[in-house]
Amino acid sequence: MAEHLASIFGTEKDRVNCPFYFKIGACRHGDRCSRLHNRPAISPTLLLSNMYQRPDMITPGVDAQGQPIDPSKIQEHFEDFFEDIFEELSKFGEIETLNVCDNLADHMIGNVYVQFKEEDQAAAALSALQGRFYSGRPIIADFSPVTDFREATCRQYEENSCNRGGYCNFMHVKMIGRELRRKLFGRHHGRFWGRRSRSRSKSPPQHYHRRERERERDHERRDYRGGGGGVEVINMGEGMRAKGEGMEGVRGGAGVL
């Protein structure tokens, strides 16, 4: 019996524990879910809920005044946000993964997942984030059960074939450009969203790496055409930092933390 329960833990067959919370650290039912959300006491991964505010929150591609937004400006806005968050959180340790969700559902929109190499680094970051603000909004951070982003990510979205759109229950991860990826993670860092800790799991098979490189090239072609494989940007108002500015509560900038 114990082996059976262990084998179905966090799957649809598990009638006790919520599989979506286990896989993506978020559930559309929230506290009303009929299954348990087992919140970890410690984890290498933090979830910063609804932190990224798209410039086209109301209507994709259109600003709050109803004016169309240049896709390149949307991308620029997102990459400024991504770099801002990365630089601040990397003060607490090596970041292996930084994902920002492109989903539209309330429980996933703007979610930021940061996975550190070590659990104590994540704990230090979580402690430092308490009572902090970003763009005038409080940062809501907690440990996340997610450590394998391959299980959390929507494969159909990566292949441009997800028919659920922004309301998919799996992560639609926003892409950053090649240059920023190399700047932050290094030339040989593997995938754009990082890698799993060597201490926690074995490396994916070789064919997986080939598939990832193909997906990356596809996203880069889409970005070149201005299509968007993930990014957002807007004018650098009170939200995002201008170059050189910091996060609230850190260096007194308009940005974050």
Image: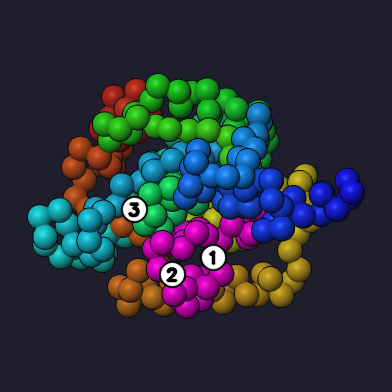
State whether the magenta stretch is mostly helix, strand or loop: loop
- For label 3, the crowd category at 10 Å Cα-Cα, with few meaning under 14, some 14 to 19 and many 20 or more, is many
Identified by mark 2, the residue type is Arg
Q: Which residues, given as a range, are shown in magenta?
A: 148-177
Task: Tell me: 206 left or right of 110.
Answer: right
Q: Nearer the viewer, residue 129 or 39?
A: 39
Question: Which residue type carries mark 1?
Answer: Cys
Q: Secondary structure at mark 1?
A: loop
Which mark lies nearer to you, 1 or 2?
2
Which residue is at 18% across, 62% downward? 62
- On screen, residue 58 above or below 48: below
Decide which of 86, 4 is in the foreground and name it.
4
Tag shown at residue 154: 1
Q: Give the residue drawn at x 61%, y 40%.
A: 37
State the residue position of label 2.
Answer: 164
**Residue 215, image x, y percentages:** 54, 73
- Tag 3: residue type? Phe
Q: Quadrant of the C terminus?
A: top left
Q: Which residue is mark 3?
A: 78
Q: Of the residues tagged 2 and 3, which is closer to the observer?
A: 2
